[in-house]
Image (cartoon, coloured by chain):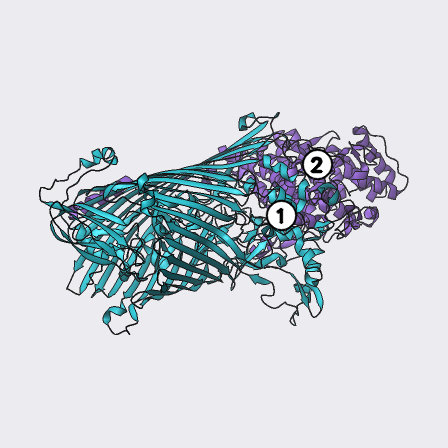
Chain colours: A purple, B cyan
C-alpha cells in the first residue's frame, strides 16, 4: 500500500519535473549588459527613447504637444488632454501628460548610457559610442530645458528648468572632448551646435555665439526615424497625417498658415516652403475632411512626408540665427538682418527687409519659426522671448484658445500665445506623487 | 451514521468486488481495446432492474443518478426518467436515487433470475442537500455536511431548455455572490466573472477554472483589441454548455486553500456529462432564435433613429447537438457533437462554434476507476469595431450620423473585418484507486491546449482614415498542463469518531507563445495578406511559468454530525522573488449538523451551522521580481535596449484571509431551504503597483507587497415549493448577496489612478470613482470644487469628489418555476444589480458642447442629417435643468465626474416555457422524451441609466478589467427569443 503511494508520487514528480524556473526569451536581466558588446544596444536604446518620447507617445510626443501649446499647430481632434494643451492650459495628470514627462526616461537613459559606455569600452576618451551617448544626453537635457516648466533630475527636488540646460552643456562638453579626440567630425559639430542651443536658453550669449561659430551653415544633424517599427516612426508625421489618430492636429489657426505654403492654394500665403501644408484633404469619397472634433478645418502639416523623415536636432542655419539674436540683443539690428538673410540665401529665398530693431525682431521671430517649424523648438523660443520685452511683438499672434458652444470654429475665441498658463509643459503627477523630494506638492 | 449518506455509499462501492461486463452499442467496438482490461465474466444467475423515476407531479426526471447499493455501479436516468441495471445478482437489492432538489432515497428491489424488475420511484422535493457530494476544494469527494464552507452547485442539466448560448450566460444569476459582467451585446463577446468582490488591487479578480479537474486558460485573447476595443472573448465560452452536468463554485479564500496561489478570487469547477450503464441512447437538441434590441434602448442621440433604421438589425441564432451515452458494467461513455451559429444585431457580427466531446469511464478492476475526458472546440467570432475606437460603428453612427465622426461614413466601416478564431482541446485522465476500505488515492493529468488566430483587415480604399488598407494577424498558443495527486486515509477510531487524512500535491505549467504580423498599406485593391502590404512588421513573445504546491488536510468527524477540518498548502511559484522560496496557506473549518441532535423544533427539518477560516493567494505578475531591460530596435532597426522592470527580490503572493460562517436550514420536511453566509475577507501584502519617479528612468510601476483591502458581505439563498394547486405547483428561488469592499492601506503609497475617474485610495472601495463635477448649491450652478464650502485652511471636505464604486454592492435574483400538470413547465428569472456606477463615455461624448449641431458651418454640413440642436437626447430632454444645461454647454473631459452614473438595473433575464410531448405522439418515429420549448432572454429591463446599457463595459480584455467600469458606446444586451426541441431515440 505504502509502496503504491510512494511509487505513484515519485513517478508523477519525475514526470512533472518540478522545475519552477520561469523563462522568457524576450527579457534581458540587468547583469547581462555588463559587457562591451552591449554598448551599441545601450546607446541605441537611449537614442530610440529620445525618438519615442519626443514624437510618439502622448499624442505625438513633446514635439507635437509643445507645437500646440505654442503656435505651430492647433488641436482639431477629440483628445481632451491635447485640447487642454492647445487651449493654453496644459495639465499634468492625464496619461498624455504623463507621457510628456516620460521624456525623463530618454534623458536618464542617455546619461546612463554615457556612464555605462565609458566604463565598458576600451578607449572611452575617443570612442564614438561614448561621444554619441553624451551627445544624446545633451540633446535630451536641452529639449527638457526648453519645454518643461521645472526640472527634476534622478528623483531629486524641484529645480528651475534651466537646470536641464546647464546639464546639457556639461554633456555636450564631454561629447565635444571625446569627438574631437576621436576624430568624429559630425558628432563634434552636432555637439557644438547643441551646446550653443543650451547656452542660448541659459542666456549665455557670448558662449552660445562662440559655439555656433564652430558649425557650418550647411550642417544638419538629424535624429533617425524609420519605417522599421512603430517606436522608430516620425510621430510628428503620423499625428499630422494619419486619420486613425482622429485628425488631431491642424495648421489652421496658427501664424504658419499665413507664413507657410499651402499647396492646395486656398490660403493667402507668403508661400515659405519651410512650412508647407495642405488646406484641402479629401476622403476617398471626395468629401472634405475636417478635424476629429468635426469643427475645425483639417489643414495638414506636410513638413515630414514619411514616417522615416528625419527630424533635425542641430542645424547650421539655426547657428546663424543664434548669432542674429545675439546681435539683436546687443543692439546690432543690421548685423542681425545680415545673419537672417544668410539663412534665407542658403534656402534660396529672397532677402528679408527690416528697418527698425522691432522689424528685425519680428523677422527673427518669424524666421526661427519657419526654419525650426515642428522641430520641438518653438516653445522654448517663445519662453525666451516672453521673458525679454523687446521680443514681445509676438503679442499680435492670437491663436485659438477654447470654443463657444453652438458656434462654428471660425468663432473660436483667440488669445495671445504667450498668455498660456503656464507657457511650458508641466512636471507630471506621476513624478510629483512618487518622488519623496517633491512631497506631493504640485509646483504649478 | 445516516443511511442517506452518499459518501458512505461511495466508500462501500469502492470496496466492492469485481464486476462482469457486457459491451452494448456501436461504441463497444471502439472500446474493445479498453475492454481487454481485467474483467471476469460472472456465471451466477442474474436479473435486470429497469425502473422509472418521477417527480411528485408525475413528470419523468432525467439525469438522476441511480446507484446499485453495495456495488460501484451507477447510472443516470434518460429523458423518460428510465434507468436500467443488467446482470444484477438475484436476491434483495437496493437502489439509491439522489439529485439536487430532491431527497436522497433508497428503494428495495427483488431481483429474480432472468426477470426484469420495474420499480417506479417517486421522489420527494427537498431543498436541502446535506448529503450531496462535492469535490471542489476538497482532497476527495466529500458530503456537504462535512464541509464548513459554502460551496455553490449549479445543476446545469435542469437548465436544458433555458435560453443560454454560452457558459457566461449559464452562470448568470445561478448563485448568490456570483457576479457575471457581460460587457455588451455583440456576438461572441466574453464576460468577466467576479466572486464576492475584488480580492486584489492589481491582479486578476477572476476565479481559476477547472473542467473535470483540468485547469483551463481563461485569458481573453486581445491581440486585435485596438480594432475590436471592448469586444474580447472569454475562454470560458469555449466550453459547450450542453456538455455540462454541473458546476461547483468556491467563492472565497476560506474554501480555496487547497488551490493555493492563484485561488484567492475563487474557483469554478465544471463537470461534464459522463456515460451511464445501459444501451446506447441518442439525443438531439436544437434551437432557433432571434436577437433584437428595441428602438428605445438606443435612444441616446439625435442620430439614434437613423442608426437604428440603417445599422441595427435582427440577429439569428441556431444550435444543434447530437449526443450518445451508454455503457456496460465496467465502462461507460458519453460522446457529443454540436454546432452553434449566430448573426448579431450589428452588421457582420457573428459567431460560429463547433465542438465535440468524448468522455469514457473504465473500471478495469473493482478497486480502480479511470476517467478519460476530451473535448475539442473550434470557435470563430467576427467582431464589430466598437467602443473606444475611431472605426467603431456605434461611436461614428451615434455621434456623427451617416457621415461618421472621424472622416469615414459610418456604413463604410462595415468593410472592416475582424475575426477571432480559436481551437481548444481539453483532455485529461483521472485514476481513482481504492487501495483498501480505508485508503484511496487519485491522480489527474490534464492538458488545455488553446490556439487562437486573430486577424483584421481594412481593405484598400474602404476607410478614409486608412486609405491604403491595413492587415494584422495575431496568433497565440497557450498550453496548460496540470498534475494533481491526492491520497486519503479514512479511519474509524470508534463508532462515533472518524478521521479522514489527506495529502497531495499539484503542479501547474503554463506555456504561452504569441506572434503577430502587421502589414500597412496595400499597393492596390483586392490584396488581403500581410506580405502583400507595402510595409510589414512582426513580433513574437514566449513565456513559461510554473507553480508547485503540496497540501495536507485532516478532518475529524464526531457522530456524523460535527466535523472539524484543518489543512494547509505550501506553494512555490516562478513569479516569486529570488528571496522567497515558498508560501504557506493554512485553513480550518467546522460543520455542525444541529438538526440531528433532536432539540430543534419540528419545523426545522434540517439545520447545519458552519464556520470556516482559510487563506489563498494570488501570484505576482511574471518577471515583476526581476530587474529587466527590454530588447528593442531603434534609429533604423539597430539593436537597442530600454529599461523594463525595476525588480523586487522580495516579491511574493498576496494572501487573502477569509472568515466565513453561516447556516443551512431546511423547513417543513425540507420543502424550503434557507442558506445564509456571512464572509469577511482581508487581503494582506496586496500587490500594489508602486510608481517610482519617472526621472529615475524606469517608467513601469513595480509590484510591491504593500497594500491591504477588505471585502465583507452577506449571501442568502432561499428556495422551496411555495404552493401546490392540484396539478399546478409553484417553486420559488431568491438569491441575495451584498458586498462592501475597501482599500484599507496602500502601504503609505500615493493613490494610484486605475483609469480616468477610477482610483485606488485608502478608505474607499477598490477602483472607486472620484472627480470634480457640476452641482447646484444654493441656487448656484458650478463645479463642486468651487461651490462646496472649505475649511479654515481652504481645504474641501474629505470625500467631496467621491462618486461611487465600480462593483455592485448588491445582487438579487428572483426565480420561479411553475409546473402545470405533467407536461408544462414555466421558468422565470429576474436579475438585479445595484450600488455600482459606470463611467459612461457615450454620454461624455454626446453631452459636450462640441456636439451642438448647428445649421451654419460645422458638423451639420458634413453629417448630412438636419439635427439642429444638441446631438445628445439627454441634453434636449432635460433642458431647463440647470446642471444639465451647464454640462451640455461646456467641453467634457475624461476626469469630469458628472459622467459617472448609477448602473442599477432589473432585468427579466430568462423566461422559458417547456412542453413535454406525449411519447405516444412521437414513438412511431422511434423517439421519446421529446420536449418543445419557447424561451426568452433579456426580454425586459428596468433602469434609470442614461447610456446604452448599464451592463455595458469597455475593455473587458484587461487583467483588472473587472474593476474598470466604463461604457464606451457598448452595444446593449439584446433580447433573445428561442424555439427549441429536444428528443431521444
Q: Position of residue B239 (x, y in %)?
A: 39, 44
Q: Where is residue A135 in the image (x, y as percent from the top left)?
A: 63, 37
- Is residue B140 shown to the viewer in this render? no
* Among the two numbered marks 1 and 2 on one chain, the one whose residue lies closer to the N terminus: 1
Q: Is mark 1 on a helix, strand or loop?
A: helix
Query: Does residue B142 appear left or right of residue B472 in this picture?
Result: left
Q: Position of residue B417 (x, y in %)?
A: 55, 35
What subunit carries mark 2? A
Q: Which sits in the foreground, B174 or B911?
A: B911
Q: Mark 2 points at which residue?
A: A193
What subunit carries mark 1? A
- Is residue A6 shown to the viewer in this render? yes
Taking the view exactly as shown, the residue that stands out farthest to the left is B44
Q: Is mark 2 on a helix, strand or loop?
A: helix
Q: Position of residue A361 (x, y in %)?
A: 84, 42
At 64% from the left and 67% from the top, the residue drawn is B795
Relative to A408, does residue A132 appear above or below in the rendering?
above
Residues under labels 1 and 2: Cα distance? 30 Å
Amino acid at each position: 500500500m505504502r509502496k503504491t503511494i510512494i511509487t505513484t508520487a515519485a513517478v508523477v514528480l519525475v514526470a512533472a519535473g518540478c522545475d519552477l524556473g520561469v523563462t522568457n526569451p524576450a527579457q534581458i536581466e540587468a547583469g547581462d549588459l555588463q559587457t562591451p558588446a552591449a554598448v551599441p544596444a545601450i546607446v541605441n536604446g537611449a537614442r530610440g527613447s529620445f525618438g519615442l518620447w519626443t514624437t510618439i507617445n502622448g499624442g505625438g510626443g513633446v514635439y507635437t504637444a509643445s507645437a500646440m501649446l505654442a503656435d505651430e499647430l492647433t488641436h482639431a481632434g477629440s483628445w481632451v488632454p491635447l485640447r487642454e494643451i492647445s487651449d493654453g492650459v496644459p495639465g499634468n495628470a492625464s496619461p498624455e501628460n504623463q507621457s510628456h514627462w516620460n521624456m525623463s526616461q530618454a534623458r536618464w537613459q542617455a546619461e546612463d548610457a554615457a556612464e555605462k559606455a565609458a566604463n565598458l569600452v576600451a578607449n572611452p576618451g575617443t570612442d564614438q559610442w561614448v561621444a554619441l551617448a553624451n551627445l544624446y544626453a545633451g540633446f535630451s537635457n536641452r529639449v527638457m530645458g526648453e519645454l518643461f516648466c521645472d526640472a527634476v533630475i534622478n528623483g531629486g527636488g524641484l529645480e528651475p528648468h534651466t537646470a536641464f540646460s546647464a546639464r546639457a552643456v556639461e554633456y555636450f562638453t564631454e561629447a565635444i572632448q571625446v569627438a574631437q579626440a576621436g576624430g568624429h567630425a559630425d558628432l563634434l559639430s552636432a555637439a557644438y551646435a547643441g551646446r550653443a542651443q543650451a547656452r542660448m536658453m541659459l542666456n549665455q550669449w557670448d558662449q552660445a555665439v562662440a559655439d555656433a561659430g564652430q558649425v557650418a551653415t550647411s550642417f544638419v544633424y538629424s535624429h533617425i526615424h524609420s519605417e522599421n517599427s512603430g517606436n522608430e516612426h516620425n510621430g510628428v508625421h503620423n499625428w499630422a497625417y494619419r486619420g486613425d489618430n482622429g485628425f488631431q492636429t491642424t495648421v489652421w489657426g496658427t501664424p504658419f498658415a499665413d507664413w507657410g505654403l499651402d499647396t492646395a492654394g486656398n490660403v493667402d500665403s507668403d508661400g515659405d516652403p519651410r512650412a508647407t501644408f495642405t488646406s484641402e484633404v479629401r476622403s476617398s469619397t471626395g468629401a472634405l475632411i475636417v478635424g476629429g472634433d468635426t469643427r475645425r478645418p483639417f489643414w495638414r502639416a506636410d513638413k515630414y512626408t514619411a514616417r522615416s523623415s528625419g527630424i533635425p536636432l542641430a542645424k547650421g542655419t539655426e547657428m546663424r540665427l543664434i548669432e542674429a539674436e545675439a546681435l539683436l540683443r546687443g543692439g546690432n539690428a543690421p548685423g542681425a538682418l545680415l545673419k537672417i538673410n544668410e539663412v534665407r540665401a542658403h534656402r534660396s529665398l529672397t532677402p528679408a527687409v527690416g528697418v527698425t530693431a522691432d522689424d528685425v525682431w519680428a523677422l527673427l521671430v518669424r524666421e526661427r519659426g519657419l526654419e525650426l517649424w515642428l522641430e520641438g523648438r518653438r516653445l522654448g523660443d517663445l519662453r525666451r522671448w516672453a521673458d525679454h520685452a523687446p521680443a514681445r511683438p509676438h503679442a499680435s499672434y492670437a491663436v485659438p484658445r477654447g470654443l463657444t458652444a453652438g458656434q462654428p470654429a471660425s468663432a473660436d475665441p483667440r488669445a495671445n500665445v504667450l498668455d498660456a498658463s503656464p507657457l511650458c509643459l508641466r512636471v507630471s503627477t506621476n513624478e510629483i506623487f512618487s518622488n519623496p523630494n517633491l512631497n506631493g506638492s504640485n509646483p504649478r | 451514521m445516516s443511511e442517506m449518506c452518499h459518501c458512505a455509499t461511495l466508500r462501500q462501492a469502492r470496496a466492492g468486488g469485481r464486476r462482469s461486463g457486457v459491451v452494448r452499442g456501436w461504441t463497444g467496438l471502439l472500446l474493445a481495446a479498453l475492454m481487454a482490461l481485467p474483467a471476469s465474466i460472472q456465471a451466477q444467475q442474474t436479473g435486470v432492474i429497469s425502473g422509472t423515476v418521477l417527480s411528485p407531479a408525475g413528470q419523468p426526471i432525467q439525469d438522476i443518478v441511480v446507484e446499485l447499493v453495495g456495488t460501484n455501479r451507477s447510472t443516470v436516468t434518460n429523458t423518460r426518467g428510465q434507468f436500467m441495471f443488467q446482470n444484477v445478482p438475484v436476491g434483495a437489492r437496493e437502489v439509491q436515487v439522489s439529485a439536487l432538489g430532491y431527497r436522497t432515497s433508497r428503494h428495495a428491489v427483488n431481483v429474480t433470475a432472468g426477470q426484469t424488475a420495474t420499480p417506479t420511484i417517486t421522489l420527494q422535493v427537498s431543498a436541502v442537500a446535506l448529503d450531496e457530494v462535492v469535490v471542489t476544494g476538497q482532497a476527495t469527494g466529500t458530503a456537504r455536511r462535512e464541509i464548513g464552507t459554502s460551496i455553490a452547485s449549479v445543476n446545469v442539466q435542469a437548465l436544458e431548455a433555458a435560453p443560454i448560448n454560452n457558459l457566461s450566460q449559464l452562470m448568470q444569476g445561478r448563485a448568490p455572490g456570483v457576479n457575471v459582467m457581460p460587457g455588451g451585446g455583440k456576438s461572441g463577446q466574453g464576460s468577466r466573472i467576479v466572486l464576492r468582490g475584488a480580492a486584489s488591487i492589481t491582479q486578476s479578480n477572476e476565479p481559476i477554472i477547472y473542467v473535470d479537474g483540468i485547469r483551463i486558460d481563461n485569458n481573453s485573447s486581445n491581440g486585435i483589441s485596438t480594432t475590436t476595443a471592448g469586444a474580447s472573448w472569454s475562454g470560458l465560452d469555449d466550453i459547450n454548455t450542453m456538455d455540462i452536468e454541473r458546476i461547483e463554485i468556491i467563492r472565497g479564500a476560506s474554501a480555496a486553500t487547497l488551490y493555493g496561489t492563484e485561488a484567492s478570487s475563487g474557483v469554478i469547477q465544471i463537470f461534464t456529462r459522463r456515460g451511464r450503464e445501459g444501451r446506447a441512447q441518442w439525443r438531439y437538441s436544437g434551437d432557433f432564435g432571434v436577437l433584437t434590441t428595441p428602438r428605445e434602448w438606443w435612444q441616446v442621440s439625435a442620430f439614434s433613429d437613423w442608426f437604428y433604421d440603417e445599422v441595427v438589425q435582427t440577429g439569428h441564432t441556431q444550435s444543434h447537438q447530437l449526443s450518445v451515452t451508454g455503457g456496460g458494467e465496467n465502462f461507460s461513455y458519453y460522446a457529443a457533437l454540436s454546432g452553434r451559429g449566430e448573426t448579431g444585431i450589428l452588421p457582420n457580427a457573428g459567431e460560429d462554434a463547433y465542438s465535440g466531446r468524448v468522455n469514457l469511464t473504465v473500471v478495469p478492476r473493482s478497486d480502480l476507476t479511470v476517467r478519460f475526458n476530451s473535448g475539442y472546440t473550434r470557435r470563430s467570432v467576427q467582431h464589430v469595431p466598437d467602443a473606444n475606437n475611431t472605426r467603431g460603428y456605434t461611436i461614428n453612427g451615434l455621434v456623427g450620423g451617416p457621415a461618421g465622426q472621424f472622416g469615414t461614413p459610418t456604413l463604410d466601416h462595415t468593410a472592416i473585418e475582424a475575426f477571432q478564431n480559436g481551437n481548444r482541446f481539453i483532455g485529461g485522465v483521472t485514476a481513482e484507486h481504492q487501495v483498501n476500505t480505508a485508503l484511496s488515492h487519485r491522480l489527474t493529468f490534464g492538458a488545455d491546449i488553446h490556439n487562437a488566430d486573430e486577424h483584421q483587415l481594412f481593405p484598400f480604399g474602404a476607410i478614409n482614415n486608412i486609405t491604403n488598407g491595413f492587415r494584422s494577424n495575431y496568433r497565440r498558443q497557450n498550453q496548460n498542463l496540470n498534475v494533481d495527486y491526492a491520497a486519503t486515509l479514512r479511519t474509524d477510531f470508534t463508532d462515533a469518531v472518524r478521521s479522514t487524512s489527506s495529502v497531495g500535491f499539484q503542479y501547474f505549467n503554463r506555456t504561452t507563445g504569441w506572434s503577430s504580423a502587421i502589414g500597412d498599406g496595400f499597393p492596390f485593391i483586392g490584396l488581403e495578406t500581410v506580405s502583400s502590404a507595402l510595409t510589414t512588421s512582426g513580433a513574437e513573445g514566449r513565456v513559461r511559468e510554473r507553480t508547485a504546491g503540496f497540501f495536507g488536510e485532516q478532518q475529524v468527524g464526531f457522530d456524523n454530525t460535527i466535523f472539524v477540518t484543518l489543512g494547509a498548502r505550501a506553494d512555490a511559484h516562478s513569479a516569486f522573488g529570488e528571496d522567497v522560496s515558498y508560501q504557506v496557506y493554512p485553513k480550518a473549518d467546522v460543520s455542525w449538523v444541529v438538526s440531528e441532535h433532536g432539540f430543534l423544533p419540528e419545523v426545522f427539518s434540517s439545520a447545519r451551522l458552519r464556520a470556516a477560516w482559510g487563506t489563498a493567494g494570488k501570484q505576482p505578475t511574471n518577471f515583476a521580481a526581476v530587474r529587466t531591460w527590454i530588447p528593442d530596435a531603434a534609429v533604423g532597426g539597430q539593436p537597442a535596449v530600454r529599461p523594463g522592470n525595476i525588480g523586487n527580490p522580495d516579491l511574493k503572493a498576496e494572501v487573502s484571509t477569509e472568515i466565513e460562517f453561516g447556516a443551512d436550514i431546511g423547513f417543513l420536511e425540507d420543502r424550503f431551504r434557507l442558506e445564509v453566509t456571512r464572509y469577511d475577507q482581508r487581503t494582506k501584502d496586496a500587490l500594489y503597483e508602486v510608481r517610482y519617479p519617472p526621472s529615475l528612468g524606469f517608467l513601469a510601476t513595480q509590484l510591491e507587497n504593500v497594500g491591504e483591502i477588505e471585502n465583507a458581505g452577506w449571501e442568502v439563498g432561499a428556495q422551496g415549493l411555495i404552493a401546490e394547486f392540484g396539478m399546478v405547483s409553484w417553486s420559488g428561488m431568491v438569491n441575495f448577496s451584498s458586498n462592501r469592499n475597501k482599500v484599507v492601506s496602500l502601504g503609505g503609497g500615493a493613490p494610484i489612478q486605475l483609469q480616468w475617474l477610477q482610483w485606488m485610495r485608502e478608505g474607499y472601495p477598490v477602483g472607486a470613482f472620484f472627480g470634480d463635477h457640476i452641482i447646484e448649491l444654493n441656487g448656484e450652478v458650478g463645479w463642486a470644487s468651487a461651490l462646496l464650502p472649505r475649511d479654515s485652511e481652504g481645504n474641501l471636505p474629505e470625500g467631496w469628489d467621491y462618486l461611487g464604486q465600480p462593483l455592485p454592492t448588491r445582487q438579487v435574483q428572483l426565480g420561479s418555476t411553475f409546473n402545470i400538470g405533467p407536461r408544462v413547465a414555466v421558468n422565470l428569472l429576474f436579475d438585479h444589480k445595484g450600488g455600482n456606477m459606470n463611467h459612461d463615455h457615450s454620454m461624455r461624448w454626446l453631452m459636450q458642447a462640441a456636439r451642438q449641431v448647428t445649421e451654419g458651418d460645422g458638423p451639420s454640413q458634413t453629417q448630412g442629417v438636419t439635427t439642429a440642436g444638441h446631438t445628445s437626447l439627454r441634453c434636449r430632454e432635460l433642458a431647463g435643468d440647470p446642471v444639465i444645461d451647464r454640462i451640455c454647454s461646456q467641453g467634457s473631459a475624461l476626469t469630469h465626474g458628472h459622467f459617472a452614473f448609477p448602473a442599477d438595473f432589473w432585468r427579466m433575464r430568462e423566461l422559458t416555457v417547456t412542453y413535454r410531448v406525449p411519447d405516444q405522439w412521437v414513438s412511431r418515429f422511434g423517439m421519446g422524451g421529446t420536449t418543445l420549448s419557447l424561451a426568452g432572454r433579456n426580454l425586459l429591463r428596468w433602469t434609470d441609466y442614461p447610456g446604452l446599457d448599464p451592463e455595458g463595459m469597455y475593455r473587458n480584455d484587461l487583467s483588472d478589467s473587472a474593476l474598470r467600469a466604463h461604457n464606451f458606446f457598448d452595444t446593449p444586451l439584446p433580447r433573445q427569443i428561442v424555439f427549441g426541441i429536444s428528443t431521444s431515440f
